[in-house]
Image (cartoon, rainbow, N blue to C red):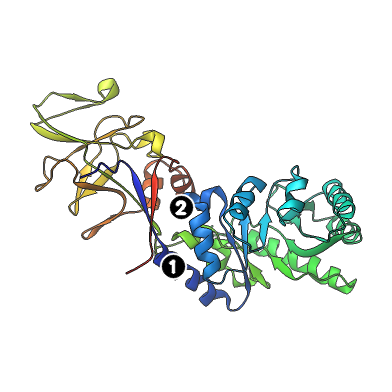
Amino acid sequence: MELKKAFAEIDLRALSHNLKEVKKRTGKRSIIAVVKANAYGHGLVEVSRHLVQEGVEMLGVAFTEEAIQLREAAIESPILVFFDRENIEAYLKYNLIPTVFDFTTAKRLSEEAYKHNLQLPIHIKVDTGMGRIGLDIKSAESMVLRIVRLKNIRAEGLMSHLSEADLADRYFTLHQIEKFRNLINSLRGKGVTFKYLHIANSAAVLKFPEAYFNTIRPGIMLYGYGCTENDNLKPVLSLKSNILYLKKVPAGTPISYGRTFITKRTSTVATLPVGYADGYNRRLSNCAEVLINGRRAPVVGRVCMDTVMVDVTDISDISIDSEVVLIGGSGKEKITAQDIAERIETIPYEVLTSIGQRVKRIYKKDV
């Protein structure tokens, strides 16, 4: 058997299921599917192509480099770029949609679009409480009015970002939504309307129908992770490997760097060709488990750059090349990115986006 090293299985059926859950909650609203950070580690091009085939109206990325990659893969859907204010030529060349959060950038975009005799669509971002980027909500109305008057600019979207929609305290989120709604109504009173109005991220889709407006912007929930275990979402990614080496060692044998684990009994230790260079975090040393033949096997010793050791003494019917599940299911057992995140005190976003480029993605479309 050819050694597969670390590989990620991407279940496109689960991706479709999660998108249906979005639509079931939000009706016929426009969807901007967030595919930044290599589609949260799942593979930018293949995931985006599948989402477009499933009817997503627009894709959202962080920077123009990601958008260019999609265009070079012949994906023609509208692409909204969230953070890039420098690469103005790319917006024009590749027909991309910039997010504008200051007047200076809006003016530069207007001037370049005028030179090329183009009408450039933009989305304007306002800060309702995230404290990151966006027009100050106190002066946003006057600034939006200035931006929409610029030549060769078509302001088709108005957006904001929620800071804690996934938390139990609803007050601040509802306050952000109210600020956004008040701005929309005030601008409408002055004759300014937008095709796309969006503030709802995944957490808001799941918990705050007040935030839907006419467009929603799901990210992590598309990949199978929500606010609770009862959100009816299916994880899209499984991280797997194979046993590289098996050895039987006596009690008192140190395993891996620093001798942080020493066997207490005669043990069988399996070495896996996956490590922190692949995104399997070093903080999982001595505290994580993997699945082999539907059984849990503990990680022993420090996670290395390219390898992990696990204790398989209590697991039968294994051999070199046996499949190992680091994230995913085996038999009745499962390990999710949420489980991994809790072990290392982070969030599933970091676990998924940390999976490295040398991990091959394998896409599953059929039952």
The spot of residue 302 in percent (x, y) is: 30, 29
Residue type beneath disc 1: Asp
Residue at the image position 87 percent from the left and 57 percent from the top? 117
Q: Quadrant of residue 120?
A: bottom right
Q: Residue at x 70, y 58 (%)?
A: 160
Amino acid bearing label 2? His
For residue 42, the mark is 2
Mark closer to the observer (1, 2): 2
**In this view of the protein, can residue 261 be seen by the observer?**
yes
Residue 219 position in % (x across, y down): 54, 59
Q: Which of the 4 image quarters holds residue 57?
A: bottom right
Q: Which corner quadrant holds the C terminus? A: bottom left
State the residue in front, 352 or 340: 352
Residue at x 78% of width, y 69% of height: 194
Which residue corresponds to the image point at 29% horizontal and 36% vertical from the top-left?
A: 273
* Left or right of 41 in this view: 332: left
| Residue 100 in sight in this render | no
Please name the residue that numbered disc 1 is placed on. Answer: 231
Q: Is residue 87 placed above or below 49 in the rendered structure?
A: above
State the SS at label 2: loop
Q: Are marks 1 and 2 in contact (CB under 8 Å)?
A: no
Residue 206: where, in percent of width, then height? 52, 67
Classify mark 1: residues with Cα within 10 Å, few (<14), some (14-19) or many (20+).
some
Quadrant for the N terminus, please. top left
